[in-house]
């Protein structure tokens, strides 16, 4: 006979409730653990990243920029007067001497003006010579008149002295002696007047000749100008060098001031570097520089810094002190490195692909004895071309990843495979 068991159903319900609560608690704990579990670190091919080790010691600060070689002396030869291009004697690239004819030009009006100036100069020279002869002749006449008066004075003086002796001896009357003395005094005054007149005449002649000389020099200067302008129609460089450009065509009518040719001295070159404006503030005149021509290096010093910024760069001139390598020529593309300063006993590492000087960035630092790298904040200091100073965040011997791995910016840890 079946016996009814009291409380069995209630016990089963309690067990089911207990088991359900335990199951819910386990699910909640597992969910919480999974929520708190960090995502798996992404893996990176170790061969594709650039790494470097933090060092301590001397760090050479440098800035680098592209540029070109340019001649120190470039002569742009301009036209002095309007003219027409008749013939091109040589082409760009030719070696020229100071008297080498580059172009032949013509100007009929200038040729006529030069001829007129030559005739005017000849006439002016003739007028000057004629005036000089006439003035000399007149001065000689004045000198002759003065000499004649002086001679008469001396004769009268002798006569007066003789009459005084005769008067003392009682041989002539008193009136005769007085008349001879009066005549001598008159001729003495006339002699003094003639001397003054002769001096005034000489001064007047000099002034007339000076005035005529000025007109003659003015005429000669005009002729010399026209002759130089006519000579300049055969274009010459005036220096030794290489003809760089002749930007005109045969038959072209050109106004005065037009640049006809450009001549440079290829053996006297300098480098014009374009340095980023953020780096140019540390560049000063006199700093050492090295120019890479792709065919050798040339030593130099900074000689000039452009005060203006163009397209985000500053032009820096470097005077070359070393010997030019073969193939160095104007307009050759080069790379220049300027030595800013040497920092003693600083912490430094290779320059990362991102991050500027005096800023704070994050880098992945490799854990010793592991293939894992952890993101750490790093404060950067002064920078160079390939290195940068570490102010805070890394120690000597730390190995960091310098490549741009911005695709992992959401992760604090990566793994190198």
Image (spheres, grey):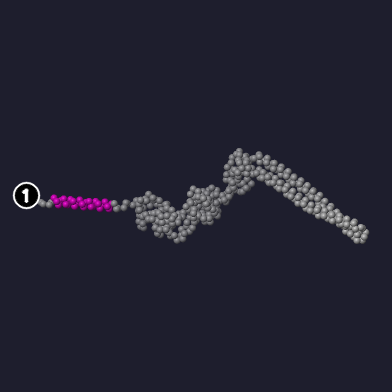
Residue drawn at (92%, 58%) of the image: 172
Residue drawn at (74%, 48%) of the image: 208
Q: Closer to the camera, 269 or 131?
A: 131
Residue drawn at (51%, 55%) of the image: 284
Left-right relation of 25 to 317: left
- Quick check: is 29 in the magenta stretch? yes
Q: Which residues are magenta?
A: 9-34
Q: Closer to the camera, 74 or 17?
A: 17
Residue 361 seen in the figure: yes
Residue drawn at (37%, 55%) of the image: 376
For residue 227, what is the image quadrant?
top right
The percent coordinates of residue 186 (x first, y second) are: 84, 54
Left-right relation of 195 to 120: right
- Quick check: is 367 in the magenta stretch? no
Q: Closer to the camera, 11 or 308?
A: 308
For residue 123, what is the image quadrant?
top right
The percent coordinates of residue 291 (x first, y second) are: 51, 52
The percent coordinates of residue 108 (x first, y second) are: 66, 39
For residue 166, what is the image quadrant?
bottom right
The percent coordinates of residue 276 (x first, y second) are: 48, 51
- The residue identified by callout 1 is 1
Q: Main secondary structure of the magenta part?
A: helix
């Amino acid at each position: 006979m079946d016996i009814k068991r009291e409380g069995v159903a209630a016990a089963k319900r309690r067990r089911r409730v207990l088991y359900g609560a335990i199951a819910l608690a386990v699910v909640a704990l597992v969910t919480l653990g999974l929520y708190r579990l960090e995502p798996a670190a992404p893996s990176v091919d170790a061969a594709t990243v650039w790494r470097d080790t933090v060092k301590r010691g001397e760090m050479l600060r440098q800035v680098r920029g592209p540029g070109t070689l340019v001649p120190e002396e470039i002569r742009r030869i301009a036209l002095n007067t309007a003219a027409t291009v008749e013939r091109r004697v040589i082409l760009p690239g030719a070696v020229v001497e100071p008297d080498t004819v580059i172009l032949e030009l013509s100007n009929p009006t200038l040729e006529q003006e030069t001829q007129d100036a030559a005739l005017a100069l000849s006439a002016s020279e003739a007028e000057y010579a004629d005036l000089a002869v006439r003035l000399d002749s007149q001065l000689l006449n004045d000198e002759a008149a003065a000499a004649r008066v002086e001679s008469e004075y001396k004769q009268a003086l002798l006569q007066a002295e003789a009459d005084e002796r005769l008067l003392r001896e009682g041989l002539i009357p008193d009136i005769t002696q007085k008349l001879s003395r009066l005549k001598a005094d008159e001729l003495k005054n006339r002699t003094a007047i003639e001397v003054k007149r002769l001096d005034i005449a000489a001064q007047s002649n000099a002034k007339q000749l000076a005035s005529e000389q000025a007109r003659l020099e003015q005429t000669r200067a005009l002729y010399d100008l026209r002759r130089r302008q006519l000579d300049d129609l055969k274009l010459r460089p005036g220096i030794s060098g290489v003809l760089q450009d002749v930007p005109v065509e045969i038959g072209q009518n050109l106004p005065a001031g037009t640049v006809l040719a450009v001549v440079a001295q290829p053996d006297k070159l300098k480098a014009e570097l374009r340095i980023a404006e953020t780096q140019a503030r540390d560049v000063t005149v006199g700093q050492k520089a090295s120019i890479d021509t792709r065919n050798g290096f040339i030593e130099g010093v900074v000689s000039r810094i452009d005060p203006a910024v163009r397209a985000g760069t500053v032009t820096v001139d470097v005077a070359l002190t070393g010997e030019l390598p073969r193939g160095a020529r104007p307009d050759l593309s080069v790379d220049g490195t300027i030595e800013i300063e040497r920092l003693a006993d600083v912490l430094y590492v290779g320059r990362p692909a991102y991050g500027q000087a005096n800023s704070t960035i994050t880098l992945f630092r490799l854990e010793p004895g592991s293939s894992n790298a952890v993101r750490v904040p790093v404060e950067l200091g002064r920078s160079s071309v390939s290195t940068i100073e570490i102010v805070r965040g890394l120690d000597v011997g730390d190995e960091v990843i310098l490549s741009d791995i911005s695709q992992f910016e959401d992760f604090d840890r990566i793994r190198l495979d």
